[in-house]
Image (cartoon, rainbow, N blue to C red):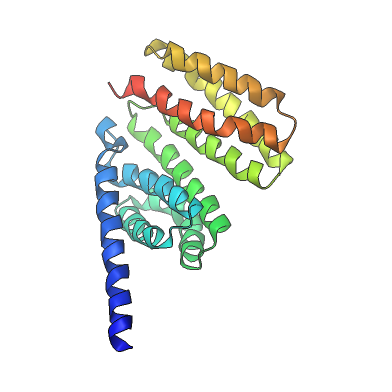
Amino acid sequence: RKDSATDTTTVASTSKLAARTELTERAADSLQVAGVPSAVADVGTHGEDLYDVAKASSWTKASAIMDSLDTSAAALTTGERTQLTSVLGPLRQAAASHDRQGAIDAANQVAFIAANLTEAYHPKMPADIVRLDYYGRELEIWAARKDMIRLSSTAADLRRTWERVRPSVLAHGGRAAAAKTDALVAQLAAAKTPADYARVSPPFLDVVDELEQPFEK
């Protein structure tokens, strides 16, 4: 029995180490390449990663990402850390208790706060494009919960954010991606049901990746 428990612990530790290694590699490709401090960029990366693994209920990976997020948050300035204070505790608790809904909510908020933090460093990648990713995930969250009030509010915020950043996308040669985004934003404006919003979320998250590309050259 003791050997079995030891084996289980070893497997969990190995899985967590593998997850942590994957995170380190992902963080190296984050927004820090565009002039944002690594701690700020990594907080955003870990927030997005936590959203993905919590959505998939991959709690061993979530634990590893939470550890990395705590490390990155500790390296922020005092003012930056303060902006995360109210969300890190609930996120840690949700991940530890395998609360999928609470974890994806809090993880997406971490990603949004990180996007806001990048602006002080004037990154090549506009913070508004990172915010569009956040709003795409919010559409996914609220469509699943059939919350039309939150869906309508999110769609309005998304539209305003897109209108703000659209000229920059066009100026950087992202005309094709901008046209796709225009069409999806128009679909959101016509959405009447949670199912309508749910249909837009996946292609919208895909097109955000295309919007990023002109700024990564």
Q: In the image, is 146 to the left or to the right of 106? A: right
Examine the rendered structure and indicate whether residue 107 appears above or below residue 165.
below
Examine the rendered structure and indicate whether residue 168 appears above or below residue 31.
above
Q: In the image, is 208 to the left or to the right of 28? A: right
169 or 140, which is in the foreground? Answer: 140
Residue at 34% over, 60% down? 64
- Percent from the top left, x then y, of residue 65? 36, 56
- Percent from the top left, x then y, of residue 19? 30, 56
80 or 27, which is in the foreground? Answer: 27
171 or 83, which is in the foreground? Answer: 171
Residue at 27% over, 73% down? 10
- Percent from the top left, x then y, of residue 63? 38, 62
- Percent from the top left, x then y, of residue 202? 53, 33
Number of marks in the image? 0
Q: In the image, is 111 to the left or to the right of 24? A: right
The quadrant of the picture occupied by the C terminus is top left
Examine the rendered structure and indicate whether residue 24 appears above or below residue 168.
below
Residue at 26% over, 57% down? 18
68 or 8, which is in the foreground? Answer: 8
Q: Residue at the right extreme?
A: 192
The quadrant of the picture occupied by the N terminus is bottom left
Which image quadrant is residue 69 in? Answer: bottom left
